[in-house]
Amino acid sequence: MQDKISNKNNAATDVVEIDLGRIWKAVLKRFWLICIVSVLCAIITTVSTFFLVTPKYESSAMFYVNNNSLSVGDASFSISQGDISAAKSLVDTYIVILNSRACLNDVIDYASVDMDYEQLQDMISASAVNSTEIFEVKITSEDPQQAEILANAIAYILPKRISSIVEGTSANIVDYAIEASEPCSPSYPKNGAIGFIIGLVISLSIVVLREIFDVTIRDDEDLSRACKYPILASVPDMANPNQSGGQYYGYGSRSSNKHRSDSTKKEAVIGKNISFVASEAYKLLRTKIQFSFVDEVVCPVIGVSSALAGEGKSLSSANLAYSLAQLDKRVLLVDCDMRRPSLSTKLLINKTPGLSNYLTGHCDISSVIQVCTFDDKAFNVISSGDNPPNPIELLSSSKMAKVLQSLKDVYDYIILDLPPVGEVSDAMVAAKLTDGILLVVRQDYCNSVALSSAVSQFEFIESRILGIVLNCVGESTGKYSRYGKGYYSKYSKYSKSYASAYAKASKKAQEDSKRRRR
């Protein structure tokens, strides 16, 4: 019970775990996009300010507070000339007088402007200058002349108003207002900078939040966190690095005729014409498969499935069959995906008659087994046959179990190309007939939720999961890049140069032999 609770706690911890390194990589990867968004926001803000914000002008008048002695009503007291805090308090008093209704109404009458008390009050700002006995009154208006007139009206009215209220003190004018030649607001550089910062924050937030909540499997570390099973091989994208899985490897409504016709280019994805790295990856997978069944099963039945459609399970099945055939093993590849079969188009074999035709009793087993040859290496294939209305019933029939049992006496390996377990339940039915399951996971396409669900479904029926084939691995992926570009590229060049030197030496030896005979 404690172990279950501990596992649940660990799972919860994994959910909230934030990989700062991955977030940083995501930010660097989209740095150009973040910069573009920030610059666009800055441009939009600046243009909007130009067209939507009305410029305002500012005029100001400055006053000196004379506070040698002060009396208010019957009370009188003296303030030292150097008492700055007292002078500031007196400035605050003058500002309160300035903002009084009576004072502002006098300013409006003197300036002869058409506005009320509240409007003028919103235009006024007053404050002490650097905590001195000088305070400044500013008028902000859309009309520069109006701002000047009102500021000078305050310069005329305020000293008189102060003298009539506060006896023994005065406010002397230091500087009169002048008409502003340039607007004080808006500030285009400032608003542009604000727009840039807003765009930066928004774009960064989107990138970070997307990366935090993104469950797509992007590398082997994500795969290791999603499930406990080992990665048996990492295969590069052989079909088209620029196509997403749903487009090229399409299943159901995701596929298109265009990409289906492109899949006839078998030489690029199966056989000797695939890349050296891909070939070595499948050889590595072949070796690990062989070690998985040492002295256990005479003829292992291996199911190949995936969590989602479009992850490349059919290509992986075909290349695994070809790789085993290179060792002169007797291999049978069976297309058990009766809803959306693809092996017949990828291997240039007949779709019918196939497995469904045999299971429904329309033909015998020998008529559905076809030979597929690549580079002088052959393996047998059973295509899916006609699309039946009841594929689950056919795969779960006793006839399916019996034919597999009989075929084990003929072949060294039987590979079942199963449907995606996350799309249909056919794979779970056929998986019961296998000795092990390979899960194909497409990088930057499958997500950890779908993969965990697929693993749980196979574990529920107690199928043995051999491991994961990480498919369509990009060259920029960490370990693949370091190992693939380093070791594989050098080894490929070495093997090619060695083969070339061997061919030249053999040719020279044959010529020497002919000369001796003469």
Image (cartoon, helix red, strand yellow):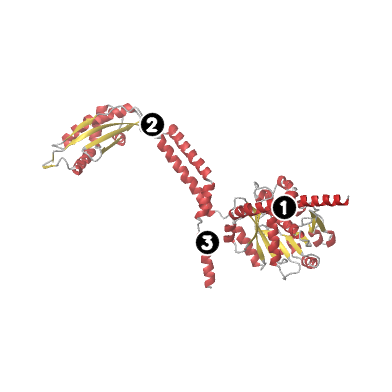
Q: Position of residue 182 (x, y in %)?
A: 36, 29
Q: Which residue is mark 1?
A: 498
Closer to the chain start, of discs 3 and 1, is: 3
Closer to the chain start, of discs 2 and 1, is: 2
Q: Position of residue 205 (x, y in %)?
A: 48, 48
Q: Residue at the spot x=53%, y=43% of the render?
A: 32
Q: Which residue is mark 2?
A: 55
186 and 301: which is toward the camera:
301
Residue 291 figure quarter = bottom right
Tag of residue 14: 3
Of tags 3 and 1, the one toward the viewer is 1
Residue 170 higher or lower than 261, as above or below: above
- For the residues labelled 3 and 1, the Cα–Cα distance comes to 49 Å
Q: Is residue 273 left or right of residue 86?
A: right
- For the residues labelled 2 and 1, the Cα–Cα distance comes to 78 Å
What amino acid type is highlighted by mark number 2? Pro
Q: Position of residue 308 (x, y in %)?
A: 65, 56
Q: Is residue 346 left or right of residue 218?
A: right
Badges 2 and 3: C-beta atoms under 8 Å apart? no
